[in-house]
C-alpha cells in the first residue's frame, strides 16, 4: 500500500473546569469595545501538520498518541483532532 | 568529601550558575550537566534549575522532558537519589511525570517577580530535612506559569500522604490549596516554584534558602 498524506489540525483547549485566566481577561475587555453579550471565552491553541499513513485510522491513531504524549498535558488540556486526506 | 550536586542545563536555563554558587557557598560541589548527555555521572543529587528550557515552547517543560538527560534523571530518582526542580525545573518534573499535577498560568495573568513567604509543612523530604515544621521562609518567586493545578484525586492523595511540602502564606498565583511545592511518594523528588538559590545571602535580601539547600546537601551525603 502506498502511504497517504493527511492534513491534521489539533485544537488544544484547557479542560472544562480548569481556570483560563487569558480567556477571562479577554472576556472582561470585550465590553469596553462596545460588544455586548459575549461570554464563555476560552483560549486554546491550534497546531497544524501533515502525517503519512496507510489509512485514515492509522493516521488518527498516531495523532491520538502524539496528543496524549506530547501536544497536550492531559492534566489540564484536551485535544480536538480534525483529519482529512491531503 | 563534599556532596556533588549535578545541575541540569537545557538551552534556555538561566539559574544554573546561581544554584552552583549557592551550593558551593554551603560547602558542596556543583557540576553542570548538559541536557543532551544521557548520564548524570557520579553526582549525589540533581537540581533542575529555573529558566525557560527550550524556550518554554508548546508548554513549559514539554520539550525538556524528552532530553536524554531526563531519562538519566528519572533513573537516578528511581534509585532513590535526591532530585529537586526549582521553578522551570518543577514544571519539567511535572511534565516528565516525576511529580503529579501541572503548572498553569498565574491567576492574575502577571509575570510575578517578588519575595514570597512560604511555610514548610513537612520535614522528611530531600529538601526540608533541616527545616522545622511551620517554619516561614522568605524566598523569591519569578514565574508566569506557577499556578499549581491538579485533579481533586491528586490533591486528596497529596494531602493524605503529607506530600505538600510548601504552601504560600499569601497565595500570589492562584495555586490550588496555596501549594508552592510538593514531593513524590518516596520523598526524594521535590519541586517548588520559589528560588532558594536566590535567597542564599543577606546581600540578596534573604538567606532563608540556605536551610533548604543545606538540607539537600545533607540528603545527598547520605
Image (cartoon, coloured by chain):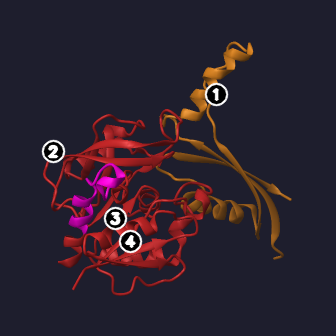
Chain colours: A orange, B red
Determine the chain carrying the residue at label 2.
Answer: B
Secondary element at tag 3: strand
The percent coordinates of residue B15 (x first, y second) are: 46, 63
Magenta residues, start to end = B199-216
* Quarter of the image with the N terminus of chain B in it: bottom left
Q: Are marks 4 and 3 in contact (CB under 8 Å)?
A: no
Query: For this rendering, which residue is in front, B153 or B95?
Result: B95
**Disc 1 versus disc 4: nearer the observer:** 4
Q: Which residue is at 40% across, 51% downward?
A: B101
Secondary element at tag 4: helix
In the visual, does B198 lie left or right of A50? left
Query: For this rendering, which residue is in front, A61 or B77?
Result: B77
Determine the chain carrying the residue at label 1.
Answer: A
The percent coordinates of residue B208 (x first, y second) are: 25, 53
Give the distance between the C-alpha atoms of the residues marked 1 and 2, in whole angstroms. Answer: 39 Å
Q: Are tags 1 and 2 found on a single chain?
A: no
Badge 3: residue crowd in 10 Å (few <14, some 14–19, many ≥20): many
Q: Which residue is at 42% across, 79% downward?
A: B72
Q: Which residue is mark 2?
A: B134
Q: Which residue is mark 1?
A: A26
Give the distance between the C-alpha atoms of the residues marked 4 and 3, in whole angstroms. Answer: 13 Å
Q: Are marks 1 and 3 in contact (CB under 8 Å)?
A: no
Determine the chain carrying the residue at label 4.
Answer: B
> Is residue B201 among the parts visible in the rendering?
yes
**For residue B168, above or below residue B9:** above
Q: Earlier in the sequence, mark 2 or mark 3?
A: 3
Determine the chain carrying the residue at label 3.
Answer: B
Secondary element at tag 1: helix
**Disc 1 versus disc 3: nearer the observer:** 3
Q: Are tags 4 and 2 found on a single chain?
A: yes
Badge 2: residue crowd in 10 Å (few <14, some 14–19, many ≥20): few
Q: Which residue is mark 4?
A: B20
Amino acid at each position: 500500500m502506498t502511504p497517504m498524506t493527511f492534513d491534521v489540525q489539533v485544537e488544544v483547549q484547557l479542560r472544562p473546569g480548569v481556570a483560563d485566566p487569558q480567556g477571562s481577561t479577554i472576556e472582561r475587555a470585550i465590553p469596553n469595545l462596545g460588544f455586548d453579550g459575549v461570554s464563555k471565552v476560552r483560549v486554546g491553541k491550534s497546531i497544524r501538520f501533515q502525517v503519512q499513513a496507510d489509512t485514515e485510522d492509522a493516521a488518527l491513531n498516531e495523532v491520538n498518541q502524539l496528543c496524549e504524549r506530547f501536544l497536550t498535558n492531559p492534566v489540564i488540556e484536551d485535544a480536538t483532532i480534525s483529519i482529512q486526506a491531503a | 568529601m563534599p556532596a556533588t550536586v549535578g545541575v541540569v542545563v537545557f538551552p534556555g536555563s538561566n539559574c544554573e550558575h546561581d544554584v552552583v554558587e549557592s551550593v558551593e557557598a554551603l560547602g558542596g560541589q556543583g557540576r553542570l550537566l548538559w541536557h543532551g548527555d544521557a548520564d548524570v555521572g557520579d553526582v549525589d543529587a540533581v537540581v533542575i534549575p529555573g529558566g525557560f528550557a527550550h524556550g518554554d515552547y508548546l508548554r513549559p517543560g514539554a520539550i525538556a522532558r524528552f532530553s536524554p538527560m531526563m531519562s538519566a534523571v528519572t533513573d537516578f530518582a528511581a534509585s532513590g537519589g535526591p532530585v529537586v526542580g526549582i521553578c522551570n525545573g518543577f514544571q519539567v518534573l511535572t511534565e516528565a511525570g516525576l511529580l503529579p499535577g501541572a503548572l498553569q498560568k498565574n491567576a492574575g495573568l502577571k509575570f510575578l517577580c517578588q519575595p514570597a513567604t512560604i511555610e514548610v509543612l513537612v520535614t522528611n523530604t530531600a529538601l526540608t530535612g533541616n527545616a522545622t515544621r511551620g517554619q516561614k521562609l522568605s524566598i523569591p518567586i519569578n514565574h508566569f506559569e506557577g499556578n499549581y493545578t491538579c485533579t481533586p484525586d491528586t490533591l486528596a492523595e497529596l494531602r493524605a500522604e503529607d506530600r505538600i511540602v510548601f504552601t504560600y502564606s499569601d497565595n500570589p498565583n492562584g495555586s490550588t490549596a496555596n501549594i508552592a511545592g510538593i514531593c513524590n511518594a518516596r520523598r526524594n523528588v521535590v519541586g517548588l516554584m520559589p528560588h532558594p538559590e536566590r535567597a542564599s545571602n543577606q546581600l540578596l535580601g534573604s538567606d532563608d534558602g540556605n536551610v533548604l539547600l543545606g538540607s539537600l546537601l545533607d540528603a545527598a551525603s547520605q
